Image (spheres, rainbow, N blue to C red):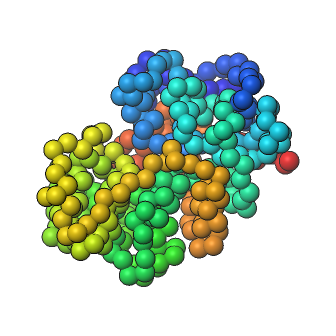
Amino acid sequence: MKAAVVYQPGGPEALVVEEREKPELKEGWSLVEILGFGLNHSEIFTRQGLSPSVTFPRILGIECVGQIAETTSDDFQIGQTVISIMGEMGRDFDGSYAEYTLLPNSQIYPVESQLPLEQLVALPETYYTAYGALKNLQIKAGDTTLIRGAASGVGIAMLRLIKAKFPNNQVYGSSRSLLKEKELLQKGFDGIIVDQQNTLQTSRSFDKILELIGPASIKDSFSHINEHGIVCSNGQLGGKWYLEEFDPIMELKNNSYLTSFYSGIVSQKGIQELLDYVSQYHVDVRPEKIFSLEQIAEAHSYLESRSGLGKVIVLNQIVKDS
């Protein structure tokens, strides 16, 4: 099989596409033929050597859509379409940047969907994360929402999930500059606010804030929250992992609430809920860019560049007939 392997931390060029033996089946695991996978900023951090638990060489990739090739479980059928997310895939063991991967049966989720392959591949990590945050933010008709990190895959996904169900809700986005303002407004944002050194350049406040920058800007987010508003932190694009010197009594202004969502909290029910929501509200889940496995270095370069916008995916092949 072909696989993209990182032998030592570095830039996009550290991703080496090479031929490898397919993983051998072992008890409690299944071999999945990968049809496609999404790229995530956490994989950039891992490639750069910023994930301390990860050893190299390693095949990255924390999500995939694929088909069961071999299995030790009676719950799966050969050729069955499945999704897998997280569970230390691409970290403790080799992940989805390949044509095949070996996955624990416990983190393989069969799915039924009529979506085209490129749209299904765009869903797992990004839209599952956004959907979990959508529920925890308790978005309702009339809410005004801010998405900090608007140009990210999860940022665009949250915008689409909100607008599909609540088209009249106002959704604002933040960005480090206005270079992408035109593109973000075309995506459906009602306005773009400059986020300068983790400080919003506005006096505007919001009912709900999706905090994708993370601990680096959470305190500032609570300076822009309305009475009884909710901030949901589920990203760390600011490069800071922990929230320090945070006094809840002083920081949780306006009787507001702090929540979070972690895509590692995944279940068959949760994935099917997302698929049903996308179908019911006709959510536009098309990816922004599609690459091949051989273009994985180029895909990483795009994702971490200033021009990077929305969800980036890699497709290996078209789904085979069952």
Residue 236 screen position, x and y as percent: 33, 45
Left or right of residue 176, residue 268 in this image: right
Q: Is residue 23 above or below residue 201?
A: above
- At 60% from the left and 67% from the top, the residue drawn is 277
Q: Is residue 170 above or below residue 210?
A: below
Question: Which quadrant is home to the N terminus?
Answer: top right
Q: Residue furthest front?
A: 249
- At 43% from the left and 62% from the top, the residue drawn is 136
Residue 66 screen position, x and y as percent: 70, 42
Left or right of residue 274, residue 116 in this image: right
- What is the quadrant of residue 320 in the picture? top right
Left or right of residue 166, residue 253 in this image: left
- Asked whether residue 252 is in view, the answer is yes
- Asked whether residue 206 is in view, the answer is no
Q: Nearer the viewer, residue 183 or 38?
A: 38
Residue 113 screen position, x and y as percent: 72, 59
- At 35% from the left and 28% from the top, the residue drawn is 50
- At 44% from the left and 59% from the top, the residue drawn is 133
